[in-house]
Image (cartoon, rainbow, N blue to C red):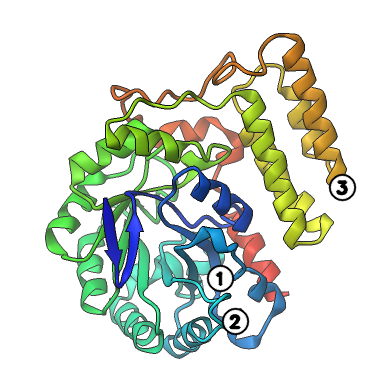
Amino acid sequence: MTLYIGHIPVEGQVFLAPLAGVSDAPFRLLCREQGAAWVCSELVSSDGLIRGSQKTLDYLYFFPEERPVGVQLFGSDPAVMAEAARYVSARPPELRPDFIDINIGCPVHKVVTREAGAALLCNLPLLGKMVRAVVDAASLPVTAKTRCGWDNDHKNGVEVAQLLEQSGVAMIAIHARTRAQKFEGKADWSVIAEAKQKVKIPLVGNGDVTSAAAAKQMLEETGCDAVMVGRGSFGNPWIFREANALLAGRPLPPLPTPRERLAALTRQFRLLLSISVERHAANEIRKHVAWYVKGLPYAAPFKERGQKIEHGDELEALAADYLAELEARGLADLPGGLAPRMAAAPDAPRSAGAGDDEDPFLADDGAAESASLAAQES
């Protein structure tokens, strides 16, 4: 299925959500290779861009193979956001993304206290003015990612979707949780379904899409044009190939083996090393270590040692040692290992909160967003 976001054709209905501290270029590339139809950078400070901060500019990097790829801007000042959009649109063709996304959903305190992110849900006049300024300034299609409201007493996601369409955006993604929920509790897909009935531009659903089955379920229950996978992709870029197969009526591919998972982890690290200094790459890959081996047998020592790596060759050696142990036990090439992830079976139901609260590595404390902002502002 081909969706058009402005003039840009997007082949497929399963997108990767922009994720602070996670959706950098190496991870996005792995997801694209596994079938993600649309990818976008983590949030980028509009203030940092117009100041010319090199650390902020680094967030704009992408591999050519990622296209179509976007850059997500956040801010609240219409003039600053417009200037940032002009800057991104005017970059040389090889450095210019395919679209600009506006963050209207980040729940982190450091963002909302600036009237940015989810705070814009409480000030629709400012939101409309800012979005129109970005659309007018950009020569690229503009998309927006938002939430269903500030809290349960202020669920204005449908009204916001209509405002965004009137303001000229080419696509809307709705995370079906409120700012108060952050990433906890069950997503309210009914807001996505209602918004889809009220807007004509492509509408993408997000929230609790942690398996291929959940992706199919959201499409069927809400009528949305595509789904956006967030934390269900952590350490699991294969979720995209599973979802695409299920949606196309093809046999589901086997779950990734421990060998495949470790190969993806080490490749992601090598890609990080190719675009950043060793210290930064080591810091960034540590969180992924635990995600890639979640559920695999005998993984505790590997995860513990993986949180302490400092150099490029350490992870390769750790992975080789762990793989050798699995080979000796006859487990290295078993799909999913002994304790596979949630199966992509069509009858797998969606669970409230997708089990995220049980995993301390997925706990939402705002650390990723705060670290991203601190890096761009230093």
Horizontal relation, residue 223 to residue 62: left or right:
left
Q: Is residue 302 above or below residue 267?
A: above
Between 193 and 39, the residue placed more toward the observer is 39
Question: What type is the residue that disc 1 sits on?
Answer: Val
Q: Tell me residue 248's x, y (percent).
A: 28, 36
The residue at 42%/69% (across/down) is 101
Snapshot quadrant of residue 363: top right
Tell which circle, 3 or 2, labels the residue nearer the N-terminal end: 2
- Residue on which the image places disc 3: 311
Tell which circle, 2 or 1, labels the residue nearer the N-terminal end: 1
Q: Tell me residue 82's x, y (percent).
A: 44, 87
Q: CA distance from mark 3 to mark 2?
A: 30 Å
Horizontal relation, residue 167 to residue 285: left or right:
left
- Residue on which the image places disc 1: 44
The residue at 27%/59% (across/down) is 3
Tags 2 and 1 in contact by the CB under 8 Å rule? yes
Between 108 and 266, the residue placed more toward the observer is 266
Q: CA distance from mark 2 to mark 1?
A: 8 Å
Question: What type is the residue that disc 3 sits on?
Answer: His
Snapshot quadrant of residue 164: bottom left
The local secondary structure at tag 2 comes to: helix
